[in-house]
Image (spheres, rainbow, N blue to C red):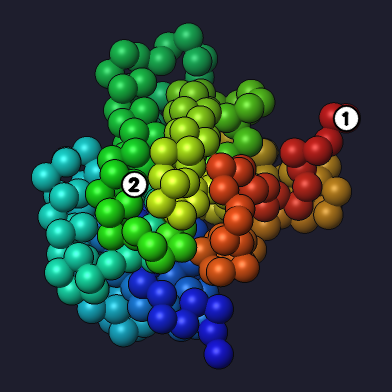
Amino acid sequence: MGLLDGKKAVIFGIANERSIAWAIAEAFRKEGAELAFTYANEMVEKRVRPLAESLGVELVLPCDVTDDGQIKTVFAEIGKVWGGLDSLVHSIAYAGKEELRGSFLNTTRQGFSLAMDISAYSLIALAREAAPLMNGRNGSIIAMTYYGSQKVFPNYNVMGVAKAALEASVRYLAEAVGPDGIRVNAISAGPLKTLAASGVGGFNQIASHVYDKAPLRTNIEQSDVAGAALYLCSDLSTKVTGGIHFVDGGYNIIGM
Ligand code: 0WD
């Protein structure tokens, strides 16, 4: 018997086999969930389709989260095919490369808006469409965040501000959908080598610092995040909502 037997989950943010969202997909499938994937554009689609096939996932839909029309279409399709939804995984972030190096003072108005739109507002937009499908099913919404929301990390810059907005949105959304029995949480993952991370200048330096200083003296792996996601989307966590759950080897508790 799997922890997610009978559950239906839609996963946003698989870019390749190193994506956190992909590790979550593999873990969810293994525990019995039925899955749907989305992709941001045709380039990503080429990588996502074979991955979907390898897990027997048939619902694979386009969704650039800056487009409300595409978001509506995804959830309309899910409603038509599944008749409801149990879990939504938001594993999406974007900021222009030039915003993720050098001084935060150079953050542009346009770069700020785009990072906020894709990395934070999109959670609200997705939750609004998902919530009606989750009614009465112990629904769970999860998002991925990083400690750069609370503390300053070199080059993380505008993404730190976007993650702070994302984390606040998790709390406000948890209150908004709580009366329908839907919970909303975020996982704050330690540094992981993915496409998104390669955009952040000095990533290796951050990862090796965490390795040296975290209580567990290690970096995390994608599967560690998937374990926490499994808990948060299973019935083991039906009374857990509005929280930021660290999966970082304990790095966040260290002062010096
Ligand atoms: O160290 C890390 N890798 C950490 C990542 C530590 C802590 C948190 N996170 C977060 C990220 O900020 C993000 O929210 O985890 C989430 C997933 O990131 P990831 O797995 O590290 O990165 P990646 O495999 O690149 O997936 C992010 C994907 C995009 O990938 P690309 O590389 O193609 O930009 O987000 C998706 C896209 O697939 N994405 C979009 N999806 C829909 N519409 C859009 C968009 N407009 N833009 C980006």
Label 2 sits on what residue type? Ala
Q: Nearer the viewer, residue 125 or 154?
A: 125
Kindly indicate the quadrant of the structure image that contains residue 205: top right
Q: Depth-wise, is mark 1 or mark 2 nearer the camera?
A: 2
Question: Which percent across, then down, holds residue 162?
Answer: 45, 29
Label 1 sits on what residue type? Met
Q: Quadrant of the C terminus?
A: top right
Q: Is residue 222 visible?
A: no
**Residue drawn at (28%, 18%) of the image:** 110
**Residue named by callout 1:** 256
Labels 1 and 2: the sequence-earlier one: 2
Q: Judging from the image, what secondary structure is the residue with disc 1 in?
A: loop
**Residue drawn at (51%, 64%) of the image:** 233
> Is 237 situated above or below 69?
below
Q: Nearer the viewer, residue 1 or 60?
A: 1
Question: How much space separates mark 1 and mark 2, taking CA atoms?
Answer: 38 Å
Q: Nearer the viewer, residue 128 or 165?
A: 128
